[in-house]
Image (cartoon, grey):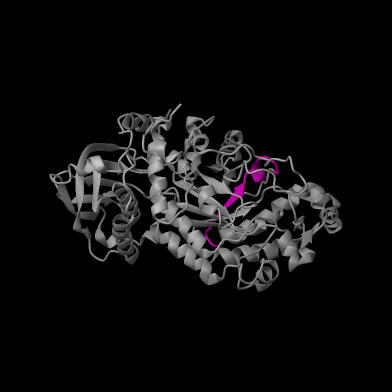
């Protein structure tokens, strides 16, 4: 076990059972005394010219603390705490201190998209018992934002009094164990409005998930309007009202950036692209053919990857989207190619015969073309694991990021090839599993990735399983994912939250499942107070009696 993880485990051994912070800090010293929040409480910034998004974050934090109105999860909901209100000290000020030169203060949104290997998210927080000013200090405004997120989780309300029962509290140099902590949302199988996405980003901010993986297109629909290629959304969106304009995309990116979240867009190619056939049928093999024969799910169709015109078209589309985004990473997918489709497609076979290439050699050329367009924009490509383990794509750059999804067991094979990975294993992190078969005329069917992935199952994930000490640096982090065959705005919150918070802690620090549930209850109830319809984990009787309902 790496030394830093050993240190975290030791530090966590003394965590109070009912501490409310999620994810748990890597270094923490907490008391159990009452400290009230002044009715005149304010947050001050100790450096000049703070960026506007930091000022906005301060405003949001003050609003959340005043309006969460969360009663503590104990029997009596804070009645026993109220007996100490009369003698408790009052906190009037929280100071935000930037440890670097004030002239280097960058907007949060700028720091949120810094390359993963140089991004600085660390912070320290002190909340004294005597009522003197609390302090959040960090090297970056992104770190200050994380300190505010932690500070927000300390406070409860009872009978009009806002207070914490964790004073004094000191957190020193809290920072994530892994740079990538993500959540993926598929907006192609079913459409989600900008407001749905923003609500999700608000929940992500609270638990320090820092990457929104936006799987924006798939075979079922093309909801993104690309200015240079308007025909794609015109023919491929479910309706004119179910597409994202350029303004919508920038709205989401800006909203995410202000909350310390990087937006990684994915346009999956060359598979999962049947919908392109609605506007360019000449580019798509097996378009609307028998999906049971030529696709994993309806509809059938994938790009004719051996056609240079198709490769150039795809590269131009990817570049047109990527050049509008501040993120340094962009996903081109690359999963689930149906080789039977290509074998049955006359134009593809003719081009392969004329070139003397195999299908995967043609994929190499296709990938070189599409990724080359991204590299020219300074972007790092992200792909699914088949590109490395099944197709043996040779034109991938060494800095390509590989998402491991089929099984957690595949991670070791990818890092063995020298690629950086993001853990996204279906056997731990797929939030859609366990809902039953969605294909019609199959009354006894189950989802392919049964069973349902509980928060406890995902919380037990070990990011370094079968990873050697020499390969640890190749593990960037991980994410939980929602494929939306059976999900829409109506159940988005409840199917994602609070389960997706489990991986937020797995990749921030090393938690202890025996003490995690009371804190997860707490963050779930706080989400509900903020308008996020997170599902309950247990009867409220259990939530008010920590660990009584443990087996």
Q: Position of residue 464 (x, y in %)?
A: 50, 33
Q: 73 or 181: nearer the eye? A: 73
Residue at (79%, 52%) from the top-left corner?
Answer: 291
Horizontal relation, residue 293 to residue 533: left or right: right
- Whether residue 216 appears in magenta in the rendering, the answer is no
Horizontal relation, residue 399 to residue 314: left or right: left
Q: 218 or 452: nearer the eye? A: 452
Residue 400 appears anywhere in the view: no
Q: 396 or 430: nearer the eye? A: 430
- Whether residue 383 appears in magenta in the rendering, the answer is yes
Residue at (70%, 55%) from the top-left corner?
Answer: 270
Q: State which quadrant residue 312 falls in.
A: bottom right
Q: State which quadrant residue 60 falls in.
A: bottom left
Horizontal relation, residue 46 to residue 389: left or right: left
Residue at (35%, 33%) from the top-left corner?
Answer: 8
The N terminus sits in image quarter: top left
Residue 106 appears anywhere in the view: yes
In magenta, the rendered stretch is: 377-391
Q: Count the labels in the image.
A: 0
Q: Position of residue 368 (x, y in %)?
A: 66, 55
Q: 332 or 163: nearer the eye? A: 163
Q: Is residue 179 above or below residue 218?
A: above
Q: Position of residue 330 (x, y in %)?
A: 56, 56
Q: Position of residue 360 (x, y in %)?
A: 74, 48
């Amino acid at each position: 076990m790496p030394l830093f993880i050993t240190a975290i485990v030791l530090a966590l051994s003394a965590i109070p059972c009912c501490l409310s912070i999620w994810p748990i800090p890597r270094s923490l010293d907490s008391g159990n005394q009452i400290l009230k929040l002044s009715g005149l409480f304010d947050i001050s910034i100790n450096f000049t010219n703070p960026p506007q998004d930091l000022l906005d974050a301060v405003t949001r934090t003050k609003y959340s603390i005043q309006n969460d109105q969360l009663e503590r999860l104990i029997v009596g909901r804070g009645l026993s705490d109220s007996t100490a209100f009369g003698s408790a000290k009052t906190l009037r000020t929280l100071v935000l201190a930037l440890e670097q030169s004030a002239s280097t203060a960058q907007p949060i949104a700028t720091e949120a998209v810094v390359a993963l290997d140089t991004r600085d998210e660390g912070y320290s927080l002190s909340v004294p018992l005597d009522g003197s000013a609390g302090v959040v200090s960090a090297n970056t405004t992104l770190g200050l934002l994380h300190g505010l997120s932690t500070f927000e989780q300390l406070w409860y309300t009872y009978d009009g009094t806002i207070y914490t029962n964790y004073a004094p509290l000191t957190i020193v140099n809290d920072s994530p164990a892994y740079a990538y902590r993500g959540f993926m949302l598929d907006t192609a199988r079913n459409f989600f409005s900008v407001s749905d996405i923003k609500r999700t980003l608000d929940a992500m901010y609270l638990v320090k998930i820092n990457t929104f993986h936006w799987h924006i297109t798939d075979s079922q629909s093309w909801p993104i309007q690309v200015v240079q290629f308007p025909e794609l959304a015109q023919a491929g969106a479910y309706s004119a009202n179910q597409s994202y304009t350029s303004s919508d995309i920038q709205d989401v990116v800006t909203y995410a950036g202000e909350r310390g979240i990087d937006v990684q867009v994915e346009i999956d190619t060359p598979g999962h692209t049947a919908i392109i056939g609605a506007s360019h049928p000449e580019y798509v093999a097996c378009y609307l053919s028998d999906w049971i024969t030529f696709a994993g799910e309806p509809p059938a169709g994938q790009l004719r990857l051996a056609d240079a015109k198709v490769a150039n078209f795809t590269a131009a589309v990817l570049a047109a989207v990527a050049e509008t985004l501040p993120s340094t990473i962009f996903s081109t997918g690359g999963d689930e190619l149906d080789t039977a489709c290509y074998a049955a497609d006359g134009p593809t076979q003719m081009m392969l015969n004329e070139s003397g290439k195999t299908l995967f050699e043609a994929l190499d050329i296709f990938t070189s073309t599409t990724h080359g367009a991204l590299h020219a924009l300074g972007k790092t490509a992200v792909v699914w694991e088949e590109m490395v383990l099944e197709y043996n794509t040779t034109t991938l750059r060494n800095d390509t990021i590989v998402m491991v999804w089929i099984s957690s067991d595949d991670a070791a094979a990818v890092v063995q090839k020298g690629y950086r990975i993001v853990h996204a294993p279906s056997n731990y992190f797929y939030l859609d599993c366990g809902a039953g078969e969605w294909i019609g005329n199959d009354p006894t069917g189950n989802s392919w990735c049964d069973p349902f992935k509980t928060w406890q199952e995902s919380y037990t994930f070990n990011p370094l399983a079968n990873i050697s000490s020499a390969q640890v640096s190749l593990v960037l982090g991980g994410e939980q994912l929602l494929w939306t065959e059976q999900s829409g705005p109506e159940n988005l919150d409840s199917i994602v939250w609070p389960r997706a918070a489990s991986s937020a802690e797995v990749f921030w620090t090393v938690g202890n499942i025996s003490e995690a549930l009371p804190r997860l209850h707490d963050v779930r109830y706080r989400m509900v107070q903020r308008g996020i319809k997170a599902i309950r984990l247990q009867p409220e009787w259990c939530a008010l009696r920590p660990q009584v309902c443990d087996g």
